[in-house]
Image (cartoon, rainbow, N blue to C red):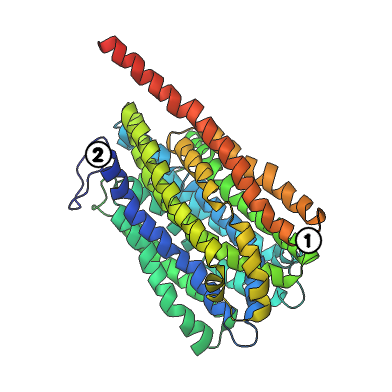
C-alpha cells in the first residue's frame, strides 16, 4: 500500500532487501544515535558541574536502574505491539492492526501514571539498596523525582514511535527522537548552569524534551497522514489483544528489565569492592555502551517490520536475506567500535569527567568491559529476529539467559576470585557476551534460518 509520504513504500515485499532494510534502518539509526543524547548529554554536563561533578554523576548512575525498569514497561506495551501490528498489516488485516495500536496507547498511558506514583513513594529506600551513599543519595533523589513527573510523555515517545516506523515512516520516527534530543541539548546547559538547578535541571530538560517528542509522535499517528491512523475506537482494551501485546513485549521488557537488575547488582558490588568512584566509572561505561547499542537497536528495529511483513506475506527468501544482511552490517559496525574503545579509551572517558581519580578508575575498567563487545551482536540480532517473527518465547528466554543466568552470577562471583576485586564486575560483561551471544545466535540458525531454507528447497522441488 502506497503512503502519502513522498518516496515511502510500506509494502516491504518490494525492492531489494539491502535497500529496503537500510531505507528503514538509516533514519532509525540516526534517531537512536540522537536519542543517546538524552542520557549522554545529561551525564556530560552533570560530570562537569563545578565541585560536585563526580558525586552528582555517581548519584545519577545509582538512579539509572530505576529509570531503566520504567523504560522496560514502555517497551513491554509499545515494542510488544509493533511486531504484531506489522504482521497483521502484512496479512492485510488493518482492522486488527488498528486495535493493536490503540490498545498499546491505552496500556502505555495507564501504566505510566501508576508506575510513577509507585516509584515516587518508595524511591529513597530503593536507591539506598541500589548503592547510594550519604554523599550521593541527594543527587539521585533530585534527578529521579523530577524525571518521574514526565513519565507519561516518556512512555508515549518510547512506546508509540515504533508504530510510526512500522508504517514505513522511518524518517518521521527519526524526527520524534531528533526534536526531543535537540531540545535536550539546548535546555540542559540553560537549566543546569544558567538557572543553577544542577541535577534537577538536567532531569527537567529531559522531561520537557520528551514532551516535544511525544507531541510530534501523537500528532502524526492521529492525523490522516498516517496510512493507518490511531483511532479512538481502538483505545478500548480487549483482553485477547492485551495478552498478545504483553506476550510479545515480554522479550523487550526482559531485555531492559534485566539491564536494570544488572545495573543494580553492579552498583552494589562496585560499592563493596571498589567504592563510589567505580560506580562513577560504570556510569561512564554505560553511557558509552548506550551510544553503541542504540545504533544497533536502530538497525534491528529497522529490520523488524521488514521481517514481520515478509513473514506474514509468506516471502521466506526475503526473510533469510534480511537476516544475513542485518548480521553482517551489525558485526562490521561493532568491530569498528571495539577497535576504537580498546586502542584509545581515555579520550572517551574525558568526555564525561576531568577528575584524575575517576579517569584512573574508568580507563582500565573500560578496556576490560569492552574487550568482547562485538559478540553482543549475536545476541541482539538473534533476539530481534525472534521478536520480529513473533517468536516471543525464544526472545524472552535469551533475554533472561545472558543477563540473569550468566552475567549477574558472574558479577557476584568474580570479584572474589584471583584478587580481581572491582575489576571482576567488569569482566562479567565480556564473558556473558561470548556465552549468551553464541547460544542465542546458534538457536536462531537452527530454529529459524535453516528451517526456512529447507522449506524453500522443498517448494523449489515441488515446482520443478
Q: Is residue 201 above or below residue 118?
A: below
Residue 280: image quadrant is: bottom right
Mark 2 vs mark 1, CA separation in Å: 51 Å
Q: Which mark is residue 16?
A: 2
Disc 2 secondary structure class: loop
Locate residue 326, reporting x and y percent: 39, 43
Mark 2: few/some/many CA within 10 Å (<14, 14-19, 20+):
few
Residue sticking out furthest to the front:
343
**Residue at 53% from the left image edge and 67% from the top image edge:** 344
Q: Quadrant of the C terminus?
A: top left
Q: Which mark is residue 421?
A: 1
Question: Is residue 400 among what the camera can see?
Answer: no
Residue in front for this viewpoint, 414 or 169: 414
Disc 1 secondary structure class: loop
- Mark 2 or mark 1: which comes first in sequence? 2
Q: Which mark is residue 396?
A: none
Q: Is residue 176 above or below residue 435?
A: below
Q: Quadrant of the N terminus?
A: top left
Q: Nearer the viewer, mark 2 or mark 1?
A: 1
Locate residue 368, reporting x and y percent: 64, 59
Locate residue 396, reporting x and y percent: 57, 38
Mark 1: few/some/many CA within 10 Å (<14, 14-19, 20+):
some
Residue 146: image quadrant is: bottom right
Q: Is residue 327 above or below residue 210?
A: above
**Residue at 58% from the left image edge and 78% from the top image edge:** 353
Amino acid at each position: 500500500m502506497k503512503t502519502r509520504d513522498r518516496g515511502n513504500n510500506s509494502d516491504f515485499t518490494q525492492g531489494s532487501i539491502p535497500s529496503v532494510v537500510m531505507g528503514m534502518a538509516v533514519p532509525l539509526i540516526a534517531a537512536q544515535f540522537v536519542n543517546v543524547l538524552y542520557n549522554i548529554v545529561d551525564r556530560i554536563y552533570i560530570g562537569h558541574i563545578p565541585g560536585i561533578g563526580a558525586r552528582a554523576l555517581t548519584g545519577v548512575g545509582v538512579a539509572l536502574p530505576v529509570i531503566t525498569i520504567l523504560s522496560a514497561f514502555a517497551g513491554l506495551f509499545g515494542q510488544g505491539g509493533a511486531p504484531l501490528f506489522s504482521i497483521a498489516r502484512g496479512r492485510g488485516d488493518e482492522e486488527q492492526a488498528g486495535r493493536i495500536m490503540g490498545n498499546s496507547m491505552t496500556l502505555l498511558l495507564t501504566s505510566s501514571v501508576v508506575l510513577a506514583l509507585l516509584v515516587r513513594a518508595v524511591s529513597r529506600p530503593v536507591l539506598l539498596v541500589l548503592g547510594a551513599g550519604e554523599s550521593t543519595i541527594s543527587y539521585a533523589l533530585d534527578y529521579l523525582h523530577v524525571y518521574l513527573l514526565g513519565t507519561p510523555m516518556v512512555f508515549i515517545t518510547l512506546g508509540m514511535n515504533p508504530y510510526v516506523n512500522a508504517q514505513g515512516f522511518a524518517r518521521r520516527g527519526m524526527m520524534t527522537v531528533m526534536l526531543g534530543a535537540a531540545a535536550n541539548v539546548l535546555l540542559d546547559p540553560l537549566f543546569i548552569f544558567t538557572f543553577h538547578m544542577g541535577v534537577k535541571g538536567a532531569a527537567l530538560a529531559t522531561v520537557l524534551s520528551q514532551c516535544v517528542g511525544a507531541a510530534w509522535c501523537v500528532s502524526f499517528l492521529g492525523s490522516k497522514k498516517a496510512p493507518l491512523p490511531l483511532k479512538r475506537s481502538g483505545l478500548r482494551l480487549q483482553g485477547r489483544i492485551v495478552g498478545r501485546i504483553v506476550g510479545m513485549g515480554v522479550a523487550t521488557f526482559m531485555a531492559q528489565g534485566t539491564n536494570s537488575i544488572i545495573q543494580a547488582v553492579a552498583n552494589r558490588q562496585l560499592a563493596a569492592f571498589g567504592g563510589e568512584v567505580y560506580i562513577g566509572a560504570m556510569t561512564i561505561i554505560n553511557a558509552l555502551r548506550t551510544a553503541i547499542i542504540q545504533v544497533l537497536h536502530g538497525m534491528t528495529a529497522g529490520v523488524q517490520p521488514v521481517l514481520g511483513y515478509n513473514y506474514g506475506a509468506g516471502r521466506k527468501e526475503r526473510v533469510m536475506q534480511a537476516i544475513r544482511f542485518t548480521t553482517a552490517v551489525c558485526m562490521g559496525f561493532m568491530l569498528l567500535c571495539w577497535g576504537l574503545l580498546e586502542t584509545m579509551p581515555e579520550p572517551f572517558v574525558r568526555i564525561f569527567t576531568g577528575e584524575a581519580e575517576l579517569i584512573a578508575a574508568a580507563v582500565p575498567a573500560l578496556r576490560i568491559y569492552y574487550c568482547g563487545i562485538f559478540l553482543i551482536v549475536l545476541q541482539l540480532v538473534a533476539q530481534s529476529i525472534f521478536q520480529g517473527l513473533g517468536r516471543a518465547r525464544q526472545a524472552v528466554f535469551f533475554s533472561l539467559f545472558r543477563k540473569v543466568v550468566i552475567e549477574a552470577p558472574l558479577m557476584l562471583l568474580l570479584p572474589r576470585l584471583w584478587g580481581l576485586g572491582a575489576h571482576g564486575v567488569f569482566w562479567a560483561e565480556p564473558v556473558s557476551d561470548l556465552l549468551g551471544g553464541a547460544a542465542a545466535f546458534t538457536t536462531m540458525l537452527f530454529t529459524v534460518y535453516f528451517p526456512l531454507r529447507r522449506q524453500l528447497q522443498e517448494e523449489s522441488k515441488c515446482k520443478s
